[in-house]
Each structure stands twice: as C-alpha cells, then as structure tokens.
Image (cartoon, rainbow, N blue to C red):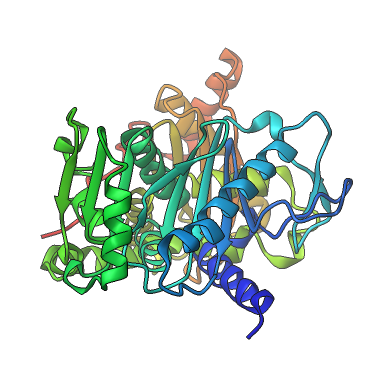
Amino acid sequence: MIIEDKGKLGEDFVNTLAYRSFLKYWCFPGPKYENGDKKEICDLLIIFNSVLIVISVKNYEFKGNHFRYFNNTIEKAVKQIHGACRTLFGAAEVQIKHPDREMEIFPREQITKVFRIVINLGEGVKFYPFNHSTKNDDYVTLFDKDSFETIISQLDTLPDFIDYLEKREKLFKGRITIIMPGDEYDFPLETQKEFFALQKQLTQNYILISGTEKDLLSHFFKNARNFPPFLNDDSNGIFLQIDGDWDSFSDIQQVKNKAEADKASYFIDDFVQNEILKNEYLQNLTPMRLNLAKAMLSFDRLTRRSIAKSYFEFHNRYKDVSGLNFGRRFGDYDGVGVLFTFYTDQMDMEMINTLNTLAIESVNLFTGYKSKSLILISSNRSHRFLFAHIDKIEKYEPDHEEMIRQDVKRMGWFTKHTLFQGSENEFPE
C-alpha cells in the first residue's frame, strides 16, 4: 500500500469518528485555501460557535525507531498545524468549502479558542510525548489511535470534548510529559536505550505516565471530570502508574449503567440531524434552524439525557389525549429555556401555531423572563415535530403582558411554572 493510501485511510478513520460524535455539518475534512494557493490547510477543521479545532492525522508505519517515528509524525504534524493557523488567521480572507455546502468565508472574527490536535495512527509505539508546542508556544494535544477512538466515543459531544481538552491543556502545558502505553516489561533492548536517552533529557517539571490515555480518562471520570489533584503539585518529576485502570473502571456496574442511561440522550443528536439539518435544507439553512441546532448541540451529554428523559415522560403523559387539549412543559438549563408542547390531531395548523406562540410568551412572562433564549419542541402522538428558537428574549411591553394574562386566563392555563430540570447522576446506581 502506498503512503498516500495509508494517509487517506487514516483521515477517513478520524473523519468518520468526528462525524458520528460531532455531526458532519461542523466538520471540514481536508479544507483547502480555495481563494489562495488551493493547498490543503490541514486534515480536519471543526468549527463550532467560537471554538476551532485543527487536526492533523498521521498514519505512518512504526518501524521500531521511536525518534525517527516522532520526526516523521509529530514534528511534521505540528508544523502543519502551525502553518494552518498562520493561513487561517493571516491578513488575507480565507474561503473554505464544506462537502455539502457552497463556498464560505472562514469566520476568524468569531473564534476565541483554538485547539490543536495531532493524531498518530501508527501502532506498536512503546512511548510517545503526551503533548507538544508550535514555534509560537501554542499547545498541541497528541493522541494515538486507541486513545482518540476511546475519548471521542466517551466524550462524544463538543462541550464534553472541549472541556477535556481545556483541562488537559491547563494541566500539562509547559510540562514535559511522556506516556508509555506499551508494557514496560516488553521493551526491546533498542527501545530501552531510546527511552533512557530521552529520560536523561528530563531534569525537572516532567511527568511519566505508565499506561494509556484511556487509563488516564478513567481517573478523569473518577475525579468528577478532573485529573488527579496531585498532578498539579510542584515537583522535579512525577511518575504515574495506571496500567489497566480503564479496563477495571469500565467493568464497574455504574459505568455500564451510564452507557444504558445515555441512550435516551441521543434523541437530541437524532433530532438535530434528522429534523433540523435535513439534507434538503443544508444549502439554504435558515438562521433559525442553524441557531436551534447550535443551541441543542451546546448541551453536554448529561444535560441531553435529562432533556430527552423529560421529553419522553411528557410525551407518554399526553400521547393518548384527543380533542382540543394542549400540553406544556418547561425547563431552564443555564439560561436556555426548553419548552415542550403537545398538540392533538384534531387541531389545525393555525390553532397549533397560535397556542405555541401563547405557550412561549406565557412561559417568558410567568417565569419572570428567566431564560435568555428559548427552544420550542412541539409534537403530536406520532412525534410529528414543529420547532422554533428564540435567540434573545426581551421583556414585553406592559400592554402585551396584559394581553398574555388575559389569553392565559381564557384558556384556563396555570400561571405557576414548575421547572422540569431534574438531577441526573452521570454514573447511576
């Protein structure tokens, strides 16, 4: 197999995982400088709100020499990422092309945080640097194939993944860190010599990790989404032995319960993919649809689980109702309101739209404008969805507030809203 084929296979592997976890709409595979030199900027860009993730993928075969492998993978990848950011944030406007959309301008003004990631897919490496930096001292996260695949499946929302990257960078930036995923008792003589040569360069402020990043991820979960506290200690050197900890962790019943409980949360992912971002709307996606998709995907996995469970409980309560009955349920998640409504098959569209408008306005009024923005998901017994997104909620004029009160009184609706926001344990008993 020629090198180009291995590189393409590696990029396809990463793209598939990224599409599955973060949805294709925000992923730009192999973007080119379309209005410039037409060269590929990097292997994958992910752009979501104010966050940019720049990914370089290397799929070189490891042939036993670690330092040569690092030069052929890490050094080249870091240079590619540095060049990508220099192009994207340079003086000239950059146009890029998404596979499913027309040409668009890279939105450099909206980007406030950049994550740089190198993914090395070569297998058999006994040790490798955990992190690196560009010539501008920008932090670069290094993943091997196994760690990337596990992390992106366990932290499979952009908020969860970004949270991990931020905490990883905050802890390890400026500290030389070497991770040893291979069995330390299975180091060939040449590998031992290479490792000792590397170790001699470590004099202070370094960390040696015996185990994989999967093993480290288990401790991240155990510490309530933080790394072990002692890794923050000032030291001339820290040795962390965690071999096999991921396997032990994933075998705990509560961890298995999490996987089962999370199944409901994918209602949110599927709703965005199949209802909001339908293929026929992608070329001319309305601002409302795009903002709604972003709002829903800004929830982490645990919040999505809570919202989805509430939706199904609400739908089950009303699914057998008929006539001119209209159901409502409201919750607020850090300033984002989520309003469920239920309409019956006996209602025409004009009535449904009128009632949904009143439901939105009454929620805003009678909760004291608690939410800064609001998501509406309206459905019937067959899960035929209607939806809306109000990006910025402002206080109504006094006359309009009085009209809402009168309409609610005529409908016989209650005016006291009990929020449905429940408390979810990430690892249920």
Looking at the image, residue 268 lies above or below residue 244: above
Number of marks: 0
Check the image and report above or below for 350 versus 256: above
Query: Which x, y percent locates residue 185?
Result: 16, 71
Kindly indicate the quadrant of the structure image that contains residue 4.
bottom right
Residue toward you, 203 or 110: 203
Query: Is residue 55 visible in the rendered structure shown here?
Result: no
Residue drawn 60% across the image and 68% down it: 11
Query: In the rendered view of the protein, which quadrant contains the N terminus?
Result: bottom right
Q: Residue at x 21, y 70 (%)?
A: 183
Q: Nearer the viewer, residue 321 or 235?
A: 235
Q: Measured from the top left, where is residue 63 in percent x and y?
A: 45, 75
Q: Could you tell me residue 272's position as x and y percent? A: 56, 58
Pick whichever, 252 or 313, lies toward us: 252
Residue in the picture at 26% in, 33% down: 205
Of all residues, the one furthest to the top in this rendering is 398
Q: Position of residue 76 (x, y in %)?
A: 59, 54
Residue at image x 45%, y 36%? 336
Q: Is residue 86 left or right of residue 257?
A: right
Q: Is residue 202 visible?
A: yes
Of 239 and 372, the residue lying toward us: 239
Q: Is residue 58 placed above or below 109 in the rendered structure?
A: below
Split into 4 quadrants, where in the image is the C terminus?
Answer: bottom left
